[in-house]
Amino acid sequence: MPELLQHIRGAGLLIVPEIILLLGVCVLFLVGPMLVTDAGEAPAGLRKGWGLFSLVTLIVAGAAWWQLGLQPAEHGLFQSDALLWYVRGLTLVGGGLLALVLWNQIDDGHSAEAYACLLSIIAGTSLVAAANDLVTLFLALELVSIPTYVILYLGRRDRIGGEATLKYFLLSIFSSALVLYGMSWVYGVAGSTNFGAIRVVLENRNPHAGEGMLELAFALLLAGLCFRIAAVPFHFYAPDVFQGTTASNAALLSLIPKIVGFVALMRVIPLSGATVGGPQWLLETDAKQLVALIAVVTMFVGNLMALRQKHLFRLMAYSSIAHAGYMLIGLAVGDLLPVGGRQAILFYLATYGLMTIGVFALLIAGGDGDRALQTDDDVRGLSRAKPIVALMLAICLFSLTGLPPTAGFLGKLYLFFAAWGEDTHIGHGLAICLAINAAISAYYYLRLVALMFLEPATRPASLHAPVAWASWFAGVACAVATIALFVTPQWLWDSIH
Amino acid sequence: MNVLLLSLMFVPLLAALVLMTGRGLFSQGGARRFALITSCITLLLSLAFANEFLQLPAEPRTSPIQPQYSIAYHWFSFQKTASDAAPGESLQFEFLFGMDRISLSLVLLTTLLTVSGVLISWESIRERAAGFYACLLLLEAGLIGVFSSFDLILFYVFFEFTLVPLFFLIGIWGGPERRYAAIKFFLYTFTGSMVMLVGLVALVMLASSAGVAQPTSFSALAQWALEHPLPQNVQIALFLAISVGFMVKVPVFPLHTWLPLAHTEAPTAGSVMLAGVLLKLGTYGLLRLCLPLFPYACETIGIPLMGSLAVAGIIYGSLCALAQRDIKKLVAYSSVAHLGFCVLGLFALNSAGITGGVLQMLNHGLSTGALFLLVGMVYDRYHTRQLDDLGGLARRLPLLTVIMVFVAMASIGLPGLNGFVGEVLSLGGMFRRNPLHAILGTSGVVLGAWYLLTMVQQAFFGPLREPHHGGEPIRDINFREFVAVAPLCALCLWIGVMPQVVIDTIKPDVDGVVAVYEEYLTSSERVAEAQVATPHAAASSTSTATLRTAATLEQPRTFSEL
C-alpha cells in the first residue's frame, strides 16, 4: 500500500501546475452556480470577478511551473522533460492572454463555467505534453476537447453558434475515434500502453512481424491529430466554426488545438514506428513524403481560400489553416543541425500564438463594447477611429505575413533554415512552397491593413462605447511582444532545448 | 563612433515613434518642425560620422567586402554555445553594423534627401501630418539600416522593413489611385524578396556546412567565395534567385511595372525617397551580394542577361518617357532608363564600370530627386502635372525654370555635370566587355536629352499656358523650396566638376569587388592554358583542366597576394 501511495505521489508531483488549475476549475464549477439565479441571471460584473480568479489561478500555476523547473523524470503515467517544460510555459502564458480576451466575450451568468472550461483546456494541453502512456494521452486530449464543446456553446447560444458547436463536436468526436483506433493498433503491436515499454518493444521486434499494423496506426494517428491542427483535408470545420463563434473562442481555437496537435504528434509518431533515429528522430521516407504533401496542400488551400474572405473570423480560420501547413514543414524535415524542425515548430507556435491572439484581442478592442469587429466594413477606416488599435493590429498582421521586424519573420526564417537544412528535394521544395505561400498570404493581410489605414471610415465611430480594456491590454501586449521577441529571440529558442 | 553610427539609426527611429505615439499632441506645424529638426540632426550626425570615418587608418584588406568600421551585437545563435559545435552545426546571426565608403556615400544621400523631403512636404501635407513625418523618418531609419548592415539576415530585415513606411506614404498621402499603387508596389517587391530569401537561406546553409565561422557576414561570405568558388550550377541558381529580389527593386526592365504607378501616386517626398534611395537598394544589393559572391554566374549569364535587360530598360524606359504627358510619370520612366545605366555599369565587372555604376547611383539620387522636388513644386502651384495644361512657366516662375533646366541638364548627362561622369564610366566599362550593349545603351543618352528637353520646352517655354488655379497668386520658388533643392544642385555641379574626389573616395571598395574578377579571369586563363598545354591528350584535357583547377583552388589565396 505505501508503494502505491509513493507511486501516486511521484506522478502527482510531475503535474502540480495542472492540479492547481483543476482545483481552480472545481471552485469555478462548484461556486459558480451558487451566484446565479435560477433564471440564469447574475450580478453585473461577476465575469470580471471570475476572470480575475482565473488569472490568479493561472499565475499560481505559473509559479508552480517556475518552481518545479526543468527536471527530467518519468513516473508511470506521466513524464517530465524539456518539451513539457516549454509547452507548459507556453500554454500558461497563452492561457493568461486568452483569459483576458474572454473578459467581455461571455455574459455574467455563464462566466464561471466558461472560465472553468478555459482552465481545464489549459490543463489538458499541458497534460498532453506530460503524458507517458497512451491512456493518459487520450484522456488529456479529451480534457481539451470536451470543455471546448462547452465553451463554444456558452459563447454564443443562437442558431449559428449552435451549428458551429455541433459541427465541431461531431468532427472532433470522429477525430478522437481515429486517434483511439490508431492507439489500439499500437497497443496491439506492443502489448503495452506505456511509452517506454512501447519503445523497448519497437526496438527489439522482428521487423517483419505485424507488418502493416504500425503503418495503419501512423496513418490513423496522423489523420486524427491533423484534425486538431486544422490541416487539409481535415480542415473543413474551421471556417464555419470560427465564423459562428465569439472572438475569444476563435482565438482559443486558432492556438490551443495547434499546440495540442503538434505536441501529440511529436509524442506518438516515434511510437508508430514511422521514424528512424533515437530521440532526435526523423521521419521515414514514406511518412516524410506524406507529411510534406499534407503540408504543401494545407498551405496552398489555406492561403488561396483566404484570399476571397470578407468575414474576418473566416479569414483568420483559413490563415490558421495556412499556418498549420507552415508548421507541418518542421515536422516533415525533423530535427537536423543546425536548425531543428521541431524546435522551429515550437518557436513558431509561440510566435503564432502572439500574433493570432493579438489579432482577435484587437478585433475585440476595436469593436463597440462587447461586439468585436467582424467584417471588412467594420475595420474600414479603423485608423481614424482607434489609431492605437489599428497600429497594433497592423503589427500583428505584418507579423502573420512574416515581415520583419516581427517575430513572425523569425518563425518563418527558422522554418526556411530547417527545411533547407534537410538538403533533399523534399526540403528544398518545401522551402520554395513556403516562400510562394508567404507571398500569396501577403495579399490578404495587406488588404486588411489597407482597409484600416487607406480607406475613410464608413461608419461613425461610437465614442461613448466602453473600451474592452482587458482585450486592449492583451492585444497591445501581443503586438509589442512580437517586436520584442524579434529583437531578443535567443532566450525563447534556448528554452526549447 | 559607435554612438554616432547607432544614433544615425536610432534618432529618426525614436523621433518616428514619438510622432506616432504622440500624434494627438502635435499640430501640423509642430510635427513638421519636429521632423525637420530630427532630419537635420541626422544629417549633421551623418556628416560627423563621415568626417571621423574618413580619418580612419586604412586597414589591409582581407575580403572583397570589408567594412572599414563595424560593431556587432549578438542577436541569435541556434546553438547554446557556438564553441562546442562542429563546423556546419552552428549558425548565428548578429546585429552587425558597419560602414564602408560605398555605403557611407549612400547614407549621406539618404540623410540629405530626407531633409529635402521634409521641406517639400511643409505645405502640401495637411492631413495626418504627424503620421506622415513619422513614416518618412521611419523610412530614413530603415534605409540607413540597410546601408549599414553587413550581416545578410540583418540586411534582409531592413531591406524588407523599408516597404512598410513607404506603403503607408504612398497609400495614405498619395494621388487618386494611391491604394492600388501602394498594394501593387508592396506585393511586387515582397514577392521578389521572398524568392531572394530562399536564395539567401540556401547560401547561408551552404556556407555554414562548408565551415564558414560567420556564414551570414558579408565579408566572411565574400572571402569564402573568393577562396573556394562555388560550383558553377550552384552559382547560377543562387545568382538568379537572389538577383530577382534586387531586379524588382531596381527595377530591371520586365519587372518594372510597379514603378511608374508608385511614383506617380506617391506624394512628392515619397517619390523623392523612392527614386533617390529606395531604387538604389536594388543596385546596392547586386553590388554587395551578387557581384562578389558569384563571379562565374556574373560573367556567364550576368553580362548577357542583365546587360541586355538593362539596355532594354534604357531604350524602353526612354521611349515610354517620351510618350508621357504627365511630367511625374515622365520622370518615373526616366528612372527606369537611368537605373539601366547603373546596372550596365555594375555588370561591366571592371573598375571603370563599377565606379560608374556607383557614381550613377549617387547621380540618379541627386538629379532625379531634384526633378521630383521641382515637379512637386509645380504641382503645388497648379495642381496639375499634365504637359497639355502647362506652358511658358518661365515667365511666372523664372528661378524655378532656371533650376529645372540645370537639373534636366544634369540628368541628361551634360559634360561638366554629374550625369555625364557616371554614364561615360558605365558605358565605357561596358564597352570593354560587350560593345554592342554599350552602343545600344548610348542611344539612351540621346533619347534622354530628347524627352527631358521636350518636357522643359513644352512646360516652361513658349506661350504662357496656365490652368485655372483659383485666383491665388502664383509665386516663384520660395526660400524653403530653394533650401530643399539647392544642396542637390550644388552636389550635381560638384560631382560634375570634380568627380575624382568621389571616385577616389569609393575606389578602395570598388577595387575590392574588381579584384574578384581579376582573380576569376586569371584562374580561368590558367584553365585555358592547361587545355592548350596538353594537346596530345585531347581526350583527357577536360579532366586535366578540372584537376588543375581543383589544384589551384585548393590553395587559398589571401587578398593581399592578388
Image (cartoon, grey):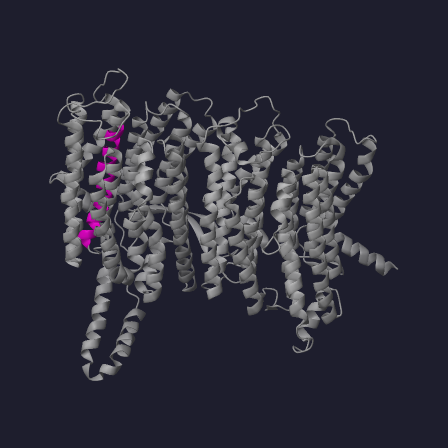
Whether the magenta-drawn stretch holds residue B371 is answered as yes
Q: Nearer the viewer, residue B507 or B155?
A: B155
Q: Does the rendering let one see residue A217? A: yes
What is the magenta segment's predominant secondary structure? helix
| x then y, percent, for residue B44 | 30, 32
Left or right side of B37 for A193: right
Q: Residue A466, how many percent across, how many down?
A: 62, 25
Camera-nearest residue between A65 and A322: A322
Q: Residue furthest left?
A: B415
Residue at left offset 61%, top offset 51% = A236
Residue B293 falls left or right of residue A178: left
Please say whether residue A86 is visible from this viewpoint: no
Which residue occupies 66% across, 44% down?
Answer: A92
Q: Is residue B287 above or below residue B54?
A: below
Report if residue A158 lies within the magenta region: no
Give the residue at x 35% y 36%: B140
The residue at the far right in this view is: A1
Q: Is residue B376 left or right of residue B162?
A: left
B90 or A342: which is nearer to us?
A342
- Residue range (magenta): B351-376
The picture places residue B453, in percent across and down from the top left corner, at: 14, 35
- The residue nearer to you, when weighing A159 against B321, is A159
- State the residue at coordinates (14%, 38%): B417
Residue A202 picture quarter: bottom right
Quarter the N terminus of chain A occupies: bottom right
Residue B1: image x %, image y %?
A: 34, 40
Q: Quadrant of the C terminus of chain A?
A: bottom right
Count of number-bearing discs: 0
